[in-house]
Image (cartoon, rainbow, N blue to C red):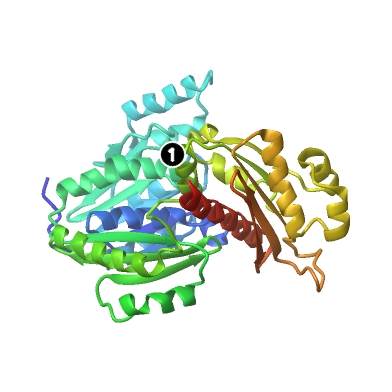
Amino acid sequence: MKNISMKSPAAAILTIGNEILSGKTINTNASFIAQELGKIGVQVTSVISVGDDDKAIKRGLKHALTFADIIIATGGLGPTRDDITKKAVADFFHRTIAIDPKQLRIVQNRFSAMGYDKMPENNITQAEIPDGARIFPNPRGTAPGLMIRDKETRCFMLPGVPDEMTLLMTEHVIPYLKHHLRNDITILYRTIRTTGIGESKLAELLDPVLGSLESPVVAYLPSPKGVDIRLTVKGTNQKELKEKIKNIENRIIFLASEYVYGFDDDTLEKIVGELLRRHNLTIAVAESCTGGLIGHRLTEIPGSSDYLDQAIVAYSNRSKIELLGVKSETLETFGAVSEQTAQEMAEGIRKTSTCDIGAATTGIAGPTGGTPQKPVGLVYIAIADKFDTITKQLNLYGERSRIKIQASQALLNLLRKHLNEKY
C-alpha cells in the first residue's frame, strides 16, 4: 500500500452526535485523538462537531478534506436509528454496504458471551461493512473500527464510547499511520503540572524564561486543580527537540519548584500515593465539606489499599463528635468551620484508625450557609502525624463543585509537601 506522501501530514477530527452539540457530553475524544496524532507528527488542522444528520456528516467530511488527508470520525456506529455515520460516510465515498459474515459472527458471539439467548436484531447493522473498508476489531464493544481509503485520503470511523475509541486509536489507528506515513516532522509535547498558584502570577514568575520564547510554544492551561504549562516543539531532529524541551523544563522547575507536582498525565493523588507507599505510611481521611471527594480521588489509583485505611464523611456535628472525637465545646465555641475543629478531626481519625497520618477538611462550599464572618469558600484543612498537626485556612471562590475540587487539591498538596519535607 502506498504511503501517505505529505511531508507534514494533517488530520481533521469529526465528532458526530447530538449529545456533543447539546453540551450534555464533553468532547474528550477530540482532545485524546489530537494528542495521540501529535505524538507521531500529525498536526490536527480542524475539529468539527456535527449532529446525527446525514447532510451534516457529509458537509463535515467535505469541509475536513479541504484541510487534511486524514479524517478521524467518532460516534454514530451504534445499532439504533440515529447511528447513521457508517452509511453517511460510505455514501460520501460512493461505497456500497453489505453484511460481513465474519463480523456478524463476532457480534453474535459477543452477545452469547454476555448471556443473551439471541442477539437483538438492531445489532445486525454493526456487521454491515462498506465495500473495501479495513476492519479494526473492537474487543470492548460490538462496533468495529473502520477505515475507508479514497486515493490519498484515509477516513477512520471509531466508536464514540471513550474507552472503545482509545483502544482502537492506540492499538490500530496510530500503528497503521506510523507504518504508512512518510513523515519527516516530529511534534513533542511536555506538560508541567502546578498547583497553589494562579495563572497570571505563574506567568509573571516564569516570564524571564518563557516571555520571549518562539519555540517551544507555551500554553497556560488553568483549571480548579491548578495550572498546567504545555510546551510544544516541532522539527525533524527528535534528539534536539527533547533536549530543547528538557532545558526549558529545568528552568521552569528552578523558578517554580514550590508549585510543580508532576508532569504529563500525573495527578496529585497519584504522587501522594507514591510517596505514602515509598515511606510505608498509612492514612485515614475525615471529610466534611468535600463530601468524600478526597477518598474518591485516592481510591482512583490502583493499589491504594496499600496506604489508604479509611475515609469518613462526617458532615454533621454529631458525626464529628461520635466518629472523630471532636469536642462538643470546640464546636460550640469555634463552630464546625474552624481551625480548631479541623485540627481535632485530623487528630481524631488518626487516633481511631491507628494510621500514621490523619487528614481532614471542613468548610462552607455554598452557595448558602455563609456569613460575613465565615463567607462561602472559607475552608480549613488539616493533617496530623507523629511530628505535628498542621492546619491551613483557605479562602476559595466559585460554585460549590469548584470549591470542593479546590479544597481536595489543597489538602493533597499539603500532604505532598509534608511528606517530602518530613519523611
Q: Nearer the viewer, residue 75 or 131?
A: 75
Question: How many numbered badges does the structure rendering display?
Answer: 1
Q: Nearer the viewer, residue 407 or 250?
A: 250
Q: Residue at x 67, y 45 (%)?
A: 292
> Which quadrant holds residue 193?
bottom left
Instruction: Where is residue 212? Give x, y as percent.
Output: 29, 81
Q: Residue at x 49, y 35 (%)?
A: 280
Residue 239 visible in the current orientation: yes
Circle 1 packing at 10 Å, graded few (<14), some (14-19), many (20+), is: few
Q: Amino acid at mark 1?
A: Arg
The residue at which mark 1 appears reads as 278
Left or right of 246? Residue 51 is: right
Q: Is residue 335 above or below residue 277?
A: below
Residue 6 visible in the current orientation: no
Instruction: Where is residue 320? Give x, y as percent.
Output: 79, 45
> Which quadrant holds residue 336?
bottom right
Which quadrant of the figure contains the N terminus? Answer: top left
Q: Is residue 248 above or below residue 111?
A: below
Q: Residue at x 30, y 68 (%)?
A: 251
